[in-house]
Amino acid sequence: MSARIALTMSITLLVCTSSAFAQKPNEELKAKGLSGNPIIEGWYADPEAVVYGDIFWIFPTYSDHFGPTPPKGIDAKNMTERQKKAINPQYLVQTFLDAFSSKDLVHWKKHARILDIKDIKWAEFALWAPSVIHANDRYYLFFGANDIQNDNEYGGIGVAIADNPEGPYKDALGKPLIDKFHNGAQPIDQFVFRDDDNQHYLYYGGWRHCNVVKLSKDLLSLQPFDDGETFKEITPEHYVEGPFVFKRDGKYYLMWSEGGWGGPDYSVAYAIGATPLGPFKRIGKILQQDPKVATGAGHHSVIPVPGSDTWYIVYHRRPLGDTNGNHREVCIDEMHFNKDGTIQPVKITFEGVRKTKPQPTP
């Protein structure tokens, strides 16, 4: 029997009992040099993955408590009037952010509470979808807070700053950067993108609308476009939330999530444009549930491995048989391109990806 066949049979036996490893990493797969899925312990969602130097980082939303000693949340006796009006009590659990780092995609270190609502005087709950970028010798973490439902509620997209990727991060403005609905877009699910000319753009939006804005050089204010417009809507067909942008071979890829975040049909689709503003016409869906593996695969990010044309997609999904919408786990799989630059459908797996070490970047 060849080594490849033996390894395949071994992996098959391991993943057949995957339910036992649903929200915890599979140590047997890790011992074989595979990341396994999920890659980190606990219920986390909306992962942003990025490489700084020779280290992979993941910045996710804290989705739900896991384990015998859950972190301390908001005391019901001391809730503010705004917190009492949260449309979903689970949002009162999602009040801080953790980060995770790895040098090989297999072994991960947890960095607890890199940002907490107690450090953001205007944030009350629903601390969501972090997006982190290194600029001006600092690390900027864009986040959503308070899940505002209209312009009469206070909250939106904020920005925090730290000297290191693991924080601690401190609120940079003392107020939201974006605190109103523009073009129908709820101010959540922010993603910051730096183009080749060092111009930074912030893509964001829930409620089926996607906007893009230009950021100032210090990333702490918005700048109008040449036509005087500040909030440009670039919503593609079937867009729901969770935009992500990257550039490859001179083309701009806009990706987003479709379907309901708490349901099995959550998925990821994409478009390709010639500029950071598009136009973006939907090409198709590339990440979705597999009834043999998991449901609700969506709200993702992608990372190229420095020094190669290897790409990974990092996303959350729900274990089979689990109908709790907040039971989301962070996973990673390979993402491949066709010769014409279109993206091949991603196969979601229990195995994840093989041990990988990035070449150091400046």
Image (cartoon, grey):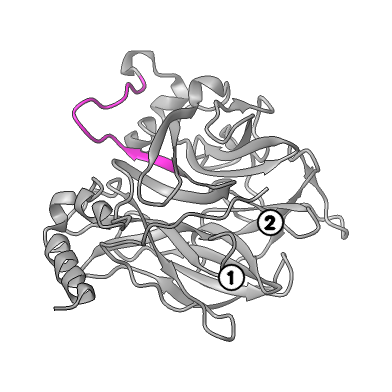
Disc assigned to residue 212? 2
- Quadrant (top left, top right, bottom left, bottom right) of the N terminus: bottom left
Residue 166: give x, y in percent of width and height: 52, 33
Q: Amino acid at mark 1?
A: Pro
- Between 1 and 33, the residue placed more toward the observer is 1
- Between 171 and 309, the residue placed more toward the observer is 309
- Between 199 and 164, the residue placed more toward the observer is 164
5 displayed left or right of 41? left
Q: Amino acid at mark 2?
A: Val
Residue occupied by mark 1 = 236
85 displayed left or right of 34? right
Residue 267: give x, y in percent of width and height: 40, 66
Count how many numbered circles sit on residues in the image: 2
Please, what secondary structure does the residue beneath circle 1 have? loop
Magenta stretch? Answer: 60-74
Q: Name the image quarter holding residue 288.
A: bottom left
Distance from the alpha carbon under mark 1 to that under mark 2 = 12 Å
351 displayed left or right of 84? left
Q: Name the image quarter holding residue 60.
A: top left
Disc 1 crowd, CA 10 A, few/some/many (<14, 14-19, 20+): many
